[in-house]
Structures are given as structure tokens and as C-alpha cells.
């Protein structure tokens, strides 16, 4: 599992750092937009917040416990703000690659701040998009916390945790087809060691969040 995790992260990073030439990418219809210049609907900001989830991420996504009604929740909350930009797309814009920078603050039983930088891979070609425009995405990146809470130490598996962890944030978005620039976002905000890829800490804190993203 560690090798698979590392390979996926490396492949995503390689695609970002080394975009394909036009000849090599014709069959994928690769489009490289870059990270500078006018936004032209490629930029976005999001505000979001949510509740701490105690149920392990593996139980949710690998063992099929997908209903939030079945999850266990803690006494901490989270609010965050992020800025992102679409830097590339491929397969006739079915897929997009986005960069994101974010900051957040925990409250309640935890009080640490977080900052993160991530790459997201997004898919948007769903058959019902003429009725409700839907996308799904997941990230790989780094998340740094201002401190290590007792909750993270308990979930780390090494009794100490780590301030710098991997950032994995699967999300689903919904928007009106006639106004796709305003998205309702449901994101699973998760930090952990990434199966040893970033840290030997096992688990970290995670939040089920809901937010609003504006694209411009």
C-alpha cells in the first residue's frame, strides 16, 4: 500500500512539474494553463467549515461506511479559507489539475492553526450535469499544524504525532448548470502520515466540512 501511495503522489507531481508536449499529449487533449497570468475562470476562493470526525478514514472509504450519519464525531470544529487555480486539463477537459493554498483554524476541544499546499485532480463529466453540475476531486499535498493536539497524538500510533503531515481532501461539488462559478462543496479535510510517505505518524485529525467556492 505504501508503494502504491507513493507512486500516485509521484505521478501527480510529475504531471504538474513536467507538462506533456503537444505531440505527446494529443491523444489526451492536454491543455496547460500555467500558474500566472489572467484568471479567465481558472481561479477560485473557498470558505468552508465543519465538524471533527472520529471514525477512521479507512473505515469510511475502504470499508464502505460512506454515510455521515453513521460516523462518530468529536467536540472540535474547523473553519478554513483556500485559494486555488486550474493549471491544466486533459481528456477534453473531463479532468483538471488544480493547485491550492489554504489556511484554517480549529476550535472547541482543539485550537491549532493549519496551512497547506496541495494538488487536486478533478473529474467533471457526469451524465446528469445538465440538471445539477457535479464534480469530484481528491488531493495530494502537505499540511502543517501550529501544534500537535492530544487527539492527534492518540491517533498517531507513535504517541507523539507530527506537525507536518500529508494532506488528503476528497470532495464533491454541486452547482447550477447556468452558474457553475458558484459551487457547494462537501470536503473531507484529512491529514495523516500518508502510509509513511510524509511521516511515521499514522492518523491525524479530520473534519467533514461544507463550503462555498467562487470561481473567477
Image (cartoon, rainbow, N blue to C red):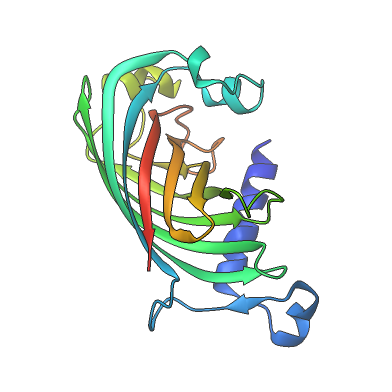
**Is 187 or 34 nearer to us in this picture?**
187
Residue sitting at x 49%, y 15% = 69
Query: Which residue is nearer to you in this view: 24 or 157?
Result: 24
The answer to whether 55 is drawn above or below residue 47 in the figure is: above
Relative placement, left or right, of 138 versus 102 is right
- On the question of residue 160 being in view, the answer is no
Image coordinates for residue 18, horizontal then vertical, percent: 60, 75
Q: Which residue appears at 69% of the width and 43% of the height?
A: 4
> Percent from the top left, x then y, of residue 111?
19, 29
On the image, the x and y values in percent for residue 46 come to 34, 52
Indicate whether 111 appears above or below 177: above
Name which residue lies at 43% across and 45% down: 184
**Relative to 113, is 95 on the left or the right?**
right
Q: Position of residue 66 (x, y in %)?
A: 59, 23
- Identify which residue, 53 or 46, lies in the foreground: 46
Going by the image, does 193 lie left or right of 115?
right
Q: Residue at x 40, y 58 (%)?
A: 100
Q: Report the front residue among 27 and 200.
A: 27
Q: How many marks?
A: 0
- State which quarter of the image contains the N terminus: top right
Where does the C terminus fall, quadrant-wise? bottom left
Q: Work out whether residue 53 can be spotted.
A: yes
Q: Quadrant of residue 122?
A: bottom right
Amino acid at each position: 500500500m505504501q508503494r502504491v501511495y507513493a507512486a500516485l503522489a509521484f505521478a501527480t507531481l510529475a504531471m504538474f512539474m513536467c507538462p506533456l508536449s503537444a505531440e505527446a499529449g494529443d491523444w489526451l487533449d492536454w491543455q496547460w494553463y500555467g500558474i500566472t497570468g489572467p484568471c479567465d475562470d481558472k481561479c477560485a476562493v473557498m470558505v468552508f467549515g465543519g465538524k471533527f470526525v472520529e471514525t477512521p478514514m479507512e473505515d469510511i472509504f475502504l470499508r464502505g461506511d460512506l454515510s455521515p450519519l453513521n460516523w462518530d464525531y468529536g467536540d472540535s470544529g474547523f473553519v478554513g479559507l483556500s485559494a486555488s487555480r486550474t493549471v491544466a486539463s486533459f481528456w477534453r477537459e473531463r479532468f483538471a489539475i488544480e493547485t491550492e493554498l489554504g489556511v484554517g483554524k480549529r476550535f472547541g476541544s482543539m485550537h491549532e492553526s493549519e496551512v497547506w499546499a496541495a494538488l487536486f485532480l478533478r473529474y467533471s463529466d457526469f451524465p446528469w450535469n445538465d440538471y445539477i453540475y457535479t464534480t469530484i476531486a481528491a488531493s495530494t499535498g502537505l499540511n502543517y499544524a501550529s501544534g500537535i493536539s492530544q487527539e492527534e497524538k492518540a491517533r498517531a500510533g507513535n504517541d507523539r504525532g507530527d506537525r507536518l503531515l500529508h494532506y488528503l481532501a476528497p470532495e464533491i461539488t454541486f452547482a447550477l448548470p447556468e452558474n457553475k462559478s458558484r459551487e457547494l462543496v462537501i470536503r473531507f479535510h484529512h491529514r495523516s502520515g500518508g502510509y509513511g510517505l510524509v511521516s511515521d505518524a499514522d492518523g491525524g485529525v479530520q473534519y467533514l466540512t461544507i463550503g462555498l467556492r467562487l470561481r473567477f
